[in-house]
Amino acid sequence: MNDYLKHLAQEAALGRMGRREFLGRAAALGVAALGANTLLATAAKAAGPQKGGTIRVGIQGGSSADSLDPALAANATATSVSRLWGEPLVELDPMGGIWHRLAESYDASADARVWTFKIRQGVTFSNGKELTAEDVLATMDRHSGEESKSGALGIMRGIKSMRAEGSDFIIELDEPNADLPYLLTDYHLLIQPGGGKDDPAAGIGTGPYILKSVEPGVRFVAEKNPNYWDDSLGHADTIEFIVINDDTARVAALQSGQVHMINRVPPRTARLVDRAPTIDVRETAGPGHYVFIAHCDKDPFANNDVRMALKYGINRQEMVDKILNGYGSIGNDTPINSSYPLFTELEQRTYDPDKAKFHMQKSGYDGSILLRTSDNSFPGAPDAAALFQQSLSAAGINLEIKREPNDGYWSEVWNKQPFCTSYWGGRPTQDSMFSTAYLSTADWNDTRFNNEQFDQLLYAARAELDEAKRTQMYADMSTMVRDEGGLVCPMFNSFIDGVSTEVDGWVDAKTGFELNNFYAPMKMWVKA
């Protein structure tokens, strides 16, 4: 019977038998649904990807203000849509290493100061133009200019010069940096024809799909690029993203079969959702963190004692228990956790209402604190704000909460208002995370952390090849952010995605963002 079941599973995997028919026959042979689904999944992977069909994704984070300019991508929807049509030089693989994309190889000088990227030949943009090293140079130049608003501007600051020579793109750094390839995996750095300087929001790139319908904040439809160079991506004929910011509606869309996958399954319902026989809930731990961010240059947060009062006044364990429901770990007011290389554990800050009260009285500020929040900032953010309000009240600190509309949160609140809820997906290395969000000159320095000593240490760490010394430098930088910055980081979240059993090809990842670093729709396929 075992061989017969395997035969049936192979027939189903090859599309010669429907999934329901296979499950029915397996049940008649006394095989439970769980065992039959496992057997079918194994056979499907052995059969390889199936081509065709449509994959629909329910995505959270979109806004009508979103742009197709990858430099401005600031939420999950903008990032995932840009993955369809664009590609970087290199990318993170599921295990945290480097995955070569438009750079087929790279090498560095002995001191890690000069890097040469060999650009893949025979690749074309969706407008028919052939990719060249000059396009790479123009793209990097657009993200590096002093007037640039790119989210990657912080990591481009250490570049002394760039040039194109034949099929080579060459970067010379001000100081050595062994992490440069990891920095270039930043999701803003998608290579565009002419660097995208003429029309950065055209949505033209070398990716596996071509955008056919664009409704920001509502819906995106893309069709397979017939000239795409990599057979390992883009199995479905069509991919459709439907923006569903409401948690309940997004889960319902998955449960009803309206979509094949969703990001950000609410932690409070994740285990319940996973019980459905047609849905798999996938958890990916990593550097992602849910945060409260205060601008260090605006009153009352310009006073570090006010910031310290907020940090001592938050109950981190309660946040992990009630907001994450165990899908994550406790934070320590630094963006770095054990998922990063060269990590050093710092003394854990704990909830202490007495210390919170002491610092607030020391600051001389006796007014209320206004916190802005939205479901669009992170799952459960309004509930987290309410918990923060309660824990601060034990210290005699009054926190007012203003719930902002989901639409426009990332354009009108985040990085503009002085105190709000937010999230970071994290980055592959400390240098990348610090350069993007804590370097004084970074455009996405959303806590307005301007610390000359921190900046100098960051640059020095890039040039330090002694691993022990570099580890200590990163620990010192984390300490500075924890004790002097505007980041209140109570928790590191796991990414929780929901995937229908109607699709296959999911890859469990060690690190990355949600939905397999946003590549799941392109790596997966529709079962027959």
Image (spheres, rainbow, N blue to C red):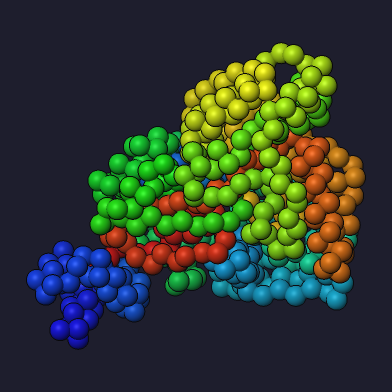
Name the residue: 71% across, 37% down: 487
Q: Quadrant of the N terminus?
A: bottom left
State the residue in front, 176 or 387.
387
Of all residues shown, which one is farthest toward the top? 367
State the residue in front, 135 or 497.
497
Horizontal side of 144 relative to 456 (left or right) equals left
Of all residues shown, which one is farthest toward the bottom? 3
State the residue in front, 494 or 212.
494
Instruction: Tell me if residue 352 comes above or below residue 365 in the rendering.
Output: below
Horizontal side of 28 relative to 388 (left or right) equals left
Q: Is residue 181 visible?
A: yes
Name the residue: 79% across, 73% down: 108
Q: Is residue 127 visible?
A: no
Residue 122 image point, x, y percent: 56, 73
Name the residue: 61% across, 66% down: 96
Residue 444 placement: quadrant: top right
Residue 185 image point, x, y percent: 64, 59
Residue 215 image point, x, y percent: 42, 38
Instruction: Tell me if residue 356 comes above or below residue 105 in the rendering.
Output: above
Residue 318 image point, x, y percent: 55, 38
Number of disc labels: 0
Horizontal side of 9 relative to 251 (left or right) equals left
Of all residues shown, which one is farthest toward the left? 28
Of all residues shown, which one is farthest toward the front? 354
Q: Quadrant of the C terminus?
A: bottom left
Name the residue: 73% across, 23% down: 357
Residue 36 placement: quadrant: bottom left
